[in-house]
Image (tube, rainbow, N blue to C red):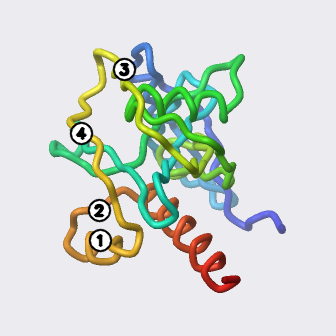
Amino acid sequence: MTKPDNEIKITNQIKIYENKYGALYDDEIEFLPQKIKGTYVRWSWNVPYSVAVLPMISPDTGVLIRSFRHSARKLILEVPKGFGEKNKEPVEIAKMELKEETGLICGAIDYKGMVFTDPAFAYHPMHLFIAWDCLEGQSNNEESEVIFESVPLKINHVDKLFSEGLLQDAITLLLVRMAQDYKRGKDEKN
């Protein structure tokens, strides 16, 4: 990959807000090579990574959670997600989030890759997983979670939910598409 002709150099990092989760910066920047000055807002999480996992209770049915998302100011249908910890592997955190947020215990968990959900605002890695052969157990939501319910999702219904505006989370859509591709490939073999 070649280096871009235009770059942005941070000339001053100005922290304007901080809490236990991260910090918000209003960076003073310089666009190169023109040397034009400006500012950019940037969020920096205090955790090394995040995880997202789509639990599958059958080859064509996943489980999503309906939780209240403060920024959206509404209930959002999405896969279980959570913050990573320095001394724990992403797969371990994904299993913990599944159990905590859905109560599901899964037979296998496949790593699907890593994405950066919003590189323009918060360049933060999120590890993606699909969990298979999931069975019900007991959920144990944290007090700070606002999860209302687990919702089964037929993965062949995702286009309808998306077109109706009921499924808006990009990470959830990506993981459901991956599960659809897997099922399609498996069906073609049979």
Judged by depth in the image, the label closer to the viewer, 4 or 1, is: 4
Residue 15 relative to residue 150: left or right: right
- Image coords of residue 108 (percent x, y): 65, 45
Residue 23 relative to residue 142: left or right: right
Earlier sequence position, callout 2 versus callout 1: 1
Q: Nearer the viewer, residue 138 or 171?
A: 138
Q: Quadrant of the C terminus?
A: bottom right
Q: Secondary structure at mark 2?
A: loop
Instruction: Report the Cα–Cα distance between label 3 and label 2.
Output: 25 Å
Instruction: Report the Cα–Cα distance between label 3 and label 1.
Output: 29 Å
Instruction: Report the Cα–Cα distance between label 4 and label 3.
Output: 12 Å
Q: Secondary structure at mark 4?
A: strand
Earlier sequence position, callout 3 versus callout 1: 3
Earlier sequence position, callout 4 versus callout 3: 3
Judged by depth in the image, the label closer to the viewer, 3 or 1, is: 3
Q: Is residue 35 above or below residue 98?
A: below
Count of numbered circles in the view: 4
Earlier sequence position, callout 3 versus callout 2: 3
Residue 149's disc number: 4
Furthest residue in direction right, as rendered? 1
Residue 172's disc number: none
Identify the residue under disc 1: 162
- Image coords of residue 152 (percent x, y): 32, 54
Q: Nearer the viewer, residue 20 or 176?
A: 176
The crowd level at tag 3 (other Cα within 10 Å; few <14, some 14-19, many 20+) is: some
Contact flag, marks 2 and 1 (Cβ < 8 Å):
yes
Q: Nearer the viewer, residue 158 or 132?
A: 132
- Image coords of residue 23 (percent x, y): 46, 24
Amino acid type at circle 3 is Asn
Earlier sequence position, callout 2 versus callout 4: 4
Q: Residue at x 83, y 68 (%)?
A: 2
